[in-house]
Image (tube, rainbow, N blue to C red):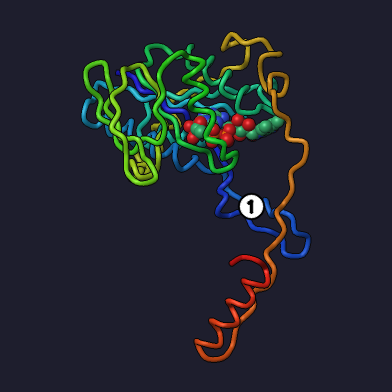
């Protein structure tokens, strides 16, 4: 069996701070990381490989050349193959163009039986890419997957809901988008880090995945970000004083004043 995992390199949004004076985002020194949900997706694939050593795991990303470092991390965790879709023509892609390119890349990877992706990327935050890739490949998709059992030609999964889960049986090939509750991703091992630098990463441009330049990136993006801004900072908090009763009364008065109750 071969499992392909879609992985994205993202800025560590926990490290992004707002400049209190200028009100702008401080991006300097913010590290790039493997998107957290994608680490869970990769871990799920690696656990299947642990149980069935005949399994091969491929990691695929669309991104700039430096995304190769993240792919090396995936190899160092235990992935067998890595694919980087990188081309200026892919720049400015919205989710529609991103999924077109990723689906074209997946079609070029030999022998893929099942595809894993993260539920959501912590930068774009749309959760659209996984389902769109499945739609372009004409295969079923289950989102928010928190448990995976693979059987003969099918996967039995738990789909996370707000107040429980659904148990779904889906035929393979299919695409599953994974949530953090699925597992605890493993660390890279020293031996594998060394090995990861011996392995080749296939780098493909638009021609290599059989796409015309006009079908990628900004050219093929129905949406355009025309303005982005930092949200205004919350005002200073106010401490209430007095006895518990007085504070409660004062709080109710303030909430009432703002028509919040
Ligand atoms: C007009 C416009 C212009 C944009 N321009 C740029 C730009 O120039 N540069 C830029 O970096 N972003 C740009 N973006 C953002 C870009 O659209 C999204 O980052 C991208 O489409 C992925 O969406 P997302 O981050 O919401 O991923 P989600 O849909 O939240 O991701 C879900 C899962 O899909 C998979 N996935 C998502 N993206 C990738 C990827 N690239 N490779 C492999 N797997 C992936 C991962 O498994 C991930 O967990 C632009 C967006 C718009 C609307």
Residue 177 screen position, x and y as percent:
42, 32
Q: Give the image quarter of residue 68.
A: top right
Which residue is pictured at 63% across the width and 22% down the height? 97
Front one among 59 and 163: 163
Q: Residue 10: percent from the left, percent from the top?
A: 56, 40
Ligand 1, seen in the image, is in the quarter at top right
Q: Which residue is under mark 1?
A: 29
> Horizontal placement of 90 versus 99: left or right?
right
User: Considering the image in quadrants, where does the C terminus appear?
Assistant: bottom right
User: Within 10 Å of the Cα at label 1, are there few (<14), some (14-19), or many (20+) other Cα atoms?
Assistant: few
- In the image, what residue occupies the spot 21% across and 30% down? 51
Q: Is residue 105 above or below residue 124?
A: above
Residue for point 75% across, 59% down: 23
Mark 1 Cβ inside 8 Å of ligand 1: no
- Horizontal side of 40 relative to 7 (left or right) equals left
Q: Is residue 19 left or right of residue 163?
A: right
Give above or below for 119 relative to 171: below
Pick out the residue farthest to the bottom.
242
Residue occupying the point 25% across, 25% down: 150
Task: Residue 17: name its quadrant.
Answer: bottom right
Quarter occupied by the N terminus: top left
Question: Element type at marker 1?
Answer: loop
Residue 101: in sight, yes or no? yes
- Residue 87 figure quarter: top right
Q: Is residue 106 above or below residue 64?
A: above
Q: How many marks?
A: 1
Q: Position of residue 163 (x, y in %)?
A: 35, 46
């Amino acid at each position: 069996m071969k499992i392909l995992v879609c992985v994205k390199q993202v800025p560590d949004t926990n490290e992004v701070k707002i400049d209190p004076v200028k009100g702008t985002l401080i991006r300097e020194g913010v590290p790039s990381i493997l998107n957290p949900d994608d680490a869970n997706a990769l871990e799920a694939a690696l656990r299947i490989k642990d149980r069935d050593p005949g399994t091969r795991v491929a990691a695929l990303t669309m991104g700039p050349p430096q995304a190769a470092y993240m792919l090396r991390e995936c190899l160092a965790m235990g992935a067998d193959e890595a694919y980087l879709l990188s081309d200026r023509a892919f720049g400015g892609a919205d989710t529609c163009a991103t999924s077109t390119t990723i689906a074209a890349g997946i079609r070029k990877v030999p022998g893929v039986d099942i595809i894993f992706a993260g539920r959501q990327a912590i930068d774009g935050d749309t959760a659209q890419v996984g389902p769109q890739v499945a739609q372009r490949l004409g295969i079923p998709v289950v989102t928010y997957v928190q448990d995976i059992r693979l059987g003969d030609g099918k996967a039995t999964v738990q789909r996370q809901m707000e107040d429980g889960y659904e148990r779904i049986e889906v035929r393979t090939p299919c695409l599953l988008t994974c949530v953090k509750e699925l597992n605890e991703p493993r660390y890279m091992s020293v031996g594998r880090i060394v090995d990861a630098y011996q392995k080749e990463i296939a780098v493909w441009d638009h021609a290599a995945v059989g796409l015309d330049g006009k079908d990628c990136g900004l050219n093929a993006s129905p949406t355009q970000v025309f303005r982005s801004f930092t949200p205004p900072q919350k005002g200073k908090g106010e401490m209430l004083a007095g006895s518990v009763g007085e504070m409660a009364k004062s709080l109710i008065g303030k909430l009432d004043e703002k028509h919040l109750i």
